[in-house]
Amino acid sequence: MIKAIEGIITKKDPTYLWLKTASGISYGVGISLFTSSKLEQGSKIELLITQIIREDANLLFGFLDRSEQEVFEMLLKVSGIGTATALAVCSGMNPDSIRSAVMSGNENAFKQIPGIGPKTAKLLIATLSDAKFGSNLAINNYQSEAIAALESLGYKKEVIVKALNGCVATDTANLVKELLKKLYKG
């Protein structure tokens, strides 16, 4: 199984690129628009790879960010979601937006993605929230400390993570204060 590929981008489309390795082999790799916006043709990069092997194809999907790759792989586990839809979701929303949409049950965020209707949006939210989706994404160290502090006060982790959406504090003490204000109101 391929886990990463390092090479030079020899051809780049909005959601697809050719990556030529030092050995001279070029790989075709599907990418999201977020990943694409950070890449330039001719540059040398290393992409994290999700490999999908099917009866009729061996597909590679590349990511610069581990959290985006995790989101893509979780989306593929949702019934009825294929690689094209998962890539469309990753192209339309960053991992933090997806997490907050799932945690807050915001169907409209998913319905903005081409190919996602009301039923699929509900299915995404239900499946990903059941899979403890929010806990699988990267949370900063100060955020984990704030969550732990509020859990010790008796708040449930799911409620705290939901309240994290929209918080602006960048250190533990101020984040705890901001979360307490939100949780007290809610």
Image: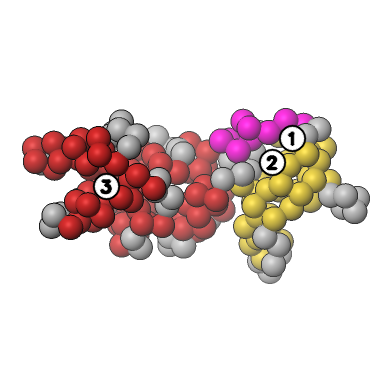
Q: Nearer the viewer, mark 2 or mark 3?
A: 3
Residue for badge 1: 12
Residue for badge 2: 16
**Amino acid at dot 3:** Ala
Asked where in the image residue 31 lies, by quadrant, the reply is top right
**Amino acid at dot 1:** Lys
Tell me whether circle 2 and circle 1 mark residues in contact (CB < 8 Å). yes
Tag 1, which secondary structure?
strand
Q: Let me know if residue 37 is in the magenta part.
A: yes
Neighbours of disc 3 within 10 Å: few (<14), some (14-19), many (20+): many
Residue 116 shows up from this direction: no
Residue for badge 3: 146
Residue 76 picture location, percent across and down = 50, 58
Residue 6 picture location, percent across and down = 76, 49
Front residue of 182/95: it is: 182
Front residue of 45/109: it is: 45
Tag 3, which secondary structure?
helix
Cα separation between marks 2 and 3 = 39 Å
Asked where in the image residue 33 lies, by quadrant, the reply is top right
Magenta part of the chain: 33-41
Is 12 placed left or right of 146 in the picture?
Answer: right
Residue 90 shows up from this direction: yes
Q: Earlier in the sequence, mark 2 or mark 3?
A: 2
